[in-house]
Amino acid sequence: MNTHEKARIQEEFQQRMDYDELLNCMRCGFCLPSCPTYLETGKDEAHSPRGRIALMKGVVDGNIEPDEEVKKSLDMCLGCRACEPVCPSGVNYGHLLEEARDIIYQNQKTPFFQKIIRKIAFKGLFPKPKRLRRLTSLLRFYQKSKLQKIVRTLKLTKILPSTYRLMEKVLPVVPKMKEAEKRQKVLEPFSKKKKRVAFFTGCLMDSMFLSTNQSTIKLLQYAGCEVVIPDNQICCGALHGHSGEKEQAKEMAKKNIEAFENLNVDYIITNAGGCGAFLNDYHHLLKDEEEWTERATSFDQKIKDISSLLVELNFHKQSLKLPYQIVTYQDSCHLKNGQQTFMEPRQLLDSVQGTDYVEMKDASRCCGSAGIYNLVQTEMSMKILDYKMKQTRATHANVIVTANPGCLLQMKMGIEKEGLADKMRAVHIVDYLVEAYEYSKNERVS
Amino acid sequence: MLPDEVKEQIIEIVGEQDFQDSYTNKLVYSYDATPQFQAMPDAIVAPHNTEQIAQIVKVCNRFKIPIVPRGSGTNLSAGTTPLEGGVVLLFKHMDKILEIDEENLTITTQPGVITQEIINQVEERGLFYPPDPGSLNISQIGGNINENSGGLRGLKYGVTRDYVLGLEAVLPNGEILHTGGKLAKDVAGYDLTRLLVGSEGTLGIITEATLKLLPLPPAKKTALTLFEDIHMAAKAVSDIIAHKIIPATLEFLDQPTIKVVEEFSKVGLPTHAKAVLLIEQDGDSHKVEQDIKSISTICKQNEAFEVHVAQTKEEAEALTTARRAALSALSRLKPTTILEDATVPRSEIANMVKAINNIAEKYELDICTFGHAGDGNLHPTFLTDVRNKEEIERVEKAFEEIFITAVELGGTITGEHGVGAMKSPYLHLKLGEAGINTMKQLKLALDPNQIMNPGKMFAKSNRKKVVIKHEYA
Ligand SMILES: Cc1cc2nc3c(=O)[nH]c(=O)nc-3n(C[C@H](O)[C@H](O)[C@H](O)COP(=O)(O)OP(=O)(O)OC[C@H]3O[C@@H](n4cnc5c(N)ncnc54)[C@H](O)[C@@H]3O)c2cc1C
Ligand code: SF4
Ligand code: SF4
C-alpha cells in the first residue's frame, strides 16, 4: 500500500465506520475464547475480535495507519461471527468487518491478475446463474469424460497447491445442469398442504450442489409445502459482501428482493447457512437507501433455514430411519451465529431411528472453510481443519452432517486429508434427511 | 522505541518469534478493559520460562525500561495500560498446570492458565477452587493473583488472596524469589506471599503459584428473589447475614441491569422487579435445603414478592453465567460504561445504595448498580459517552464523592478491581499519609529504578490517561 492509498483508506474509515459500534466494545475480552484465529495463533491479540476492533478504531482515531499488517489481521479473520453471540455488549462485529474490508479493497490497488480474477468471479460469474451453470457443466464434462482419470493417473494435479489438489478430489459429481433449467416454477406438496414457501436456490447450490437442491425441494414437498421457485432470483451476494464488493452485493440484494416480492409465501427457505445469514441482513446492507429499507425488512423476516422450518412442521416426528451409523453435526457458523439456528438440526438428526447422534467437542467452532478463506488463507484454514478433524475422530462418527456447501466441501477435504474416506462421509443435512425418510418409507412398503 | 541494544538482547533471550514491535502489535496491547485509558508500549515479549524472564528483567533494569506484565488484559483499573511505554510481558507460553496434589490439596500452576481451566481441572477430581471473578472464562490466574480478585463466591469463601499458599516471582533486580509452599502453617519470616498478592505487577513478576484447594461441596442450590424496593433488597442482605447464614453467593442487581442482562442471556430474568438478589448456598444437602428455606423467609419478611429456586443444575448455571455478563451487557446502553468498585462493611450496604443513588441524582447521571452485595462490594456503573467531556467531568466528581462516602462508612475505594492508574489519585483517602509512605518505601526498596508497571498504584501530579504518539511509518 502506498501513502496515498493509506490516507484514502483512513479518510474513509473516518467517514464510514460506525463509531458508536466501535465504542460499544468495552474490551472485556469475553469473545477471545471463541475466536478460532486467536486460539490457533497461540493467543495473539492482533488476531482476536477485541484486537481487530481496536485496530479499526485505531485507524479511525488516527492512532495508526491502515498498513499491511492491519490488513493482514482483517484478512485472517474468518468472518465466522463466533464472537457475536458471546459478546454481552452485543457488538455487531460482522457489520464492522464487512465495512472495513470494503473500504480497504475498494481503495487499494490490487495486482492486475487478481483484479481480473475478482472481476470475472464477482461481476461476470456469480451474479449470472446461467454462466455459472455452464462453467459447472465443464466440471461435469471433466468428471464424466476420461479427462479426470487421465489427469489423476498422470498425477497432473501435482502442480496444484495442496488445498486445490484436495479440492479437486472432493468436488461432488455434478449432475446435468438441464435438471435445473427444466424445473417447474411451482411444485405441489406430496401430502396435505401446510405452508406455501419460496425456495432460494443460491448460486453454488444450484450448480455444483444441484442434487442437494433437488433433495431440498423434495424434502419440502414431503413436509407438506407448496414450493415456489422464482426464476429471476440470483446469488445472494454474501461472497461479495464479505470480500469488499459491497456495491455489487447491494445490486444483487435488490434483484432478489424484487424476485421474491408478491409471491404470497409464508417463508423464503434457504439450505445454505452462509446465504441465509446474508439474506436476513439485507436491511442492514441497504440501510442507507431509504426507499429500500422497508422492502428489505419484510424480505428479511421471511428468511428461514430448512431445518428450522422442518422442526416447525414437526417433520422430526415423522418416521425417519437409517441403518446403524454414528452421526455428528458440524455447525454452519452463519446458521448458528447469524440465524441462531443450532438446536433444530440436532433435533432432526437425533430423531432418525437406528442411528446414534454424538455431539463433537466445539461443534460450533468454524471448520475453516469460510467462503473462499480456505483458498486464500490456506495455512490457517488447514490448522483449523486439523483441529476440527481431531474432534470429529473422537466421536467415531460415520457421518458428518453439515448445513452449508462450504462446510461440506471442507469436511470432505478433512476426511480425505486424514485418509478416512473408507470410514467416514460428509453430507448435507437435506440429503441425509431425504435418505432417512425414503429408507423408512421403503422399509414400511416392503 | 527501545534502544537497539535492548531489542537485540531481548531477542537473544526469547528469539525473534516472541519479540514484536510492529505498530499493529503495539496498538493491540495498548489497552485493557478500562475505558478512557490507552498508551502504546515499545515492544511485546512472550517469554517461555522463569529463567528467560529473569534475564529480560535484568536487561530492562540496566537500561531502566518499564515492564508491564499482562494477563488477559481484563482488569478495570488501567493496570496493564503501558502509560510509560516499555515492554509488555505476555504469559501465553507459560500456560500449564504443573501439578494437582490431591494429598495436600494444592494446585501448582504457571501464571498464564485461564481461571476457568483451573476450576474445571480441579472439579474433575472432586476438588474446589472457589475464587470466581466474573471474567473467569478469560482472566489468567496471574492476573487474578495480582489484582487479588474476588468473585461471586467471595462472601463465604474469601478472595484470591485466601488461596495463595506460595509463589515464585522474579524481582525487579532479576532475582528469583520463592515464598511459602504447600503448607498450612508457615511463619518463617515476613509474609511475602501476601505482599505480592494484589501488588498489580508493581513489585515483581509472578512466574508460578501454589494454590489451596478445598473438597468440592456435595450440594448446591440457587435462588432468585425479587423486590419492589431496592432498599428492601439491601436490607434483606444485612438480615440474612445477621441471622448467621453465610451464603456462598449473594449478588445484587438493579432493574436496569436486569433488563440488559436478560436481553443478552435470555434466561428468563424477571425484568419487572426493581431489584433482585441472586443467592447460592452450597454444602451438605440437608444444610443447603435448610439455609435456602430460611433465606426465602427472610427475603419475604423484607417484602420480596417472589422467591424462585432453580430446579436444575443447568438453570442455576445459566443464572450465574448471566450475572457474570452484567458489566459488559451494560455497555449496550451507552457508548461508555465506567464502573465503580467501592466497598463498605456489609451492615452499611443499604446506606451505601441510598448514597449512590443520591449522588447520581445530584450530578444528573445515569447509573446502574449491581455487585457482590454479600461482601459489601457494589459496582455502581455510570452510563456515559467519552465524547461528552462535560458529562465525563460530572462522572469524575460523582466518583470522588462515592469514594469519600465509602471511606466514611468504614469502607474502601476498591474492593477487588485494584488501584492501577484509575484509582491512584484516591488511594490517600483510604491509606492516609503513613500508608502511602510505607508503600512507597517498600516499592523503592524492591524496585529502585521503578521499572515495574510504572504509573500505577502511586498518584502522579501530571496524570495522563491517553499517551499516544501517532504511530506512523
Ligand atoms: C466483565 C468483567 C467482569 C469482571 N468481574 C470481576 C469480578 O467479579 N471480580 C474481580 O475481582 N474482578 C473482575 N474483573 C476484573 C478483572 O477481570 C480481574 O482483575 C482479573 O483478575 C484480571 O485478570 P487478567 O488476566 O485479565 O489480568 P490483566 O488485566 O492482564 O492484569 C491485571 C494486573 O495483574 C498484573 N499481572 C498480570 N499477570 C501478572 C504476572 N504473571 N505477574 C505480575 N503481574 C501480573 C498486570 O500488570 C495488572 O496490573 C472483571 C472484568 C471484566 C471485564
Ligand atoms: S465480547 Fe464484545 S465487548 Fe467484549 S471485547 Fe469482545 S467484542 Fe468487545
Ligand atoms: S469472525 Fe470469527 S475469526 Fe473473525 S474475529 Fe470473530 S470469531 Fe474471530
Image: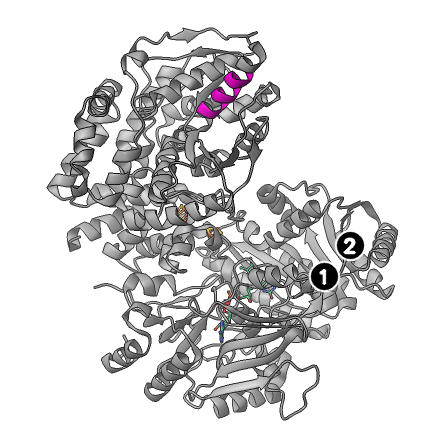
Q: Which residues are magenta?
A: A431-440
Disc assigned to residue B233: 2
Question: As rendered, which of B202 and A78 lies closer to the eye?
Answer: A78
Crowding at mark 1 (Cα within 10 Å: few <14, some 14-19, many 20+): many
Residue B125 percent across, percent down from the top left: 65, 62
User: Is residue B48 shown left or right of residue B222?
Assistant: left
B73, above or below B177, in the image: above
Give coordinates of residue B234: x percent, y percent.
77, 58
In the image, B77 versus B134, the foreground residue is B134
Q: Amino acid at mark 1?
A: Ala
Horizontal and vertical percent position of residue B238: 81, 63
Q: Image check: A168 left or right of A197?
A: left
Quarter occupied by residue A126 = top left
Indicate the quadrant containing the N terminus of chain B: top left, top right, bottom left or bottom right. bottom left
Beta carbon at label 2 within 8 Å of ligand 1:
no
- Crowding near the residue tagged with mark 2, few <14, some 14–19, many ≥20 C-alpha atoms within 10 Å: many
- As drawn, the residue found furthest toward the left would be A112
Q: Could you tell me what secondary structure mostly forms the magenta stretch?
A: helix
> Looking at the picture, which amino acid does disc 2 mark?
Ala
Q: Which chain does the residue under circle 2 lie in?
A: B
Residue at the spot 48% in from the left edge and 23% down from the top edge: A306
- State how far apart marks 2 and 1 are (Cα): 10 Å
Read off the chain for label 1: B
Q: Nearer the viewer, mark 2 or mark 1?
A: 1
Question: Are the residues tagged 2 and 1 within 8 Å (C-beta)?
Answer: yes
By what rule are the colours in the image chosen? Answer: one colour
Image side of residue B207 versus residue B163, left or right: left
Q: Quadrant of residue B466?
A: bottom left
Res B373 label: 1
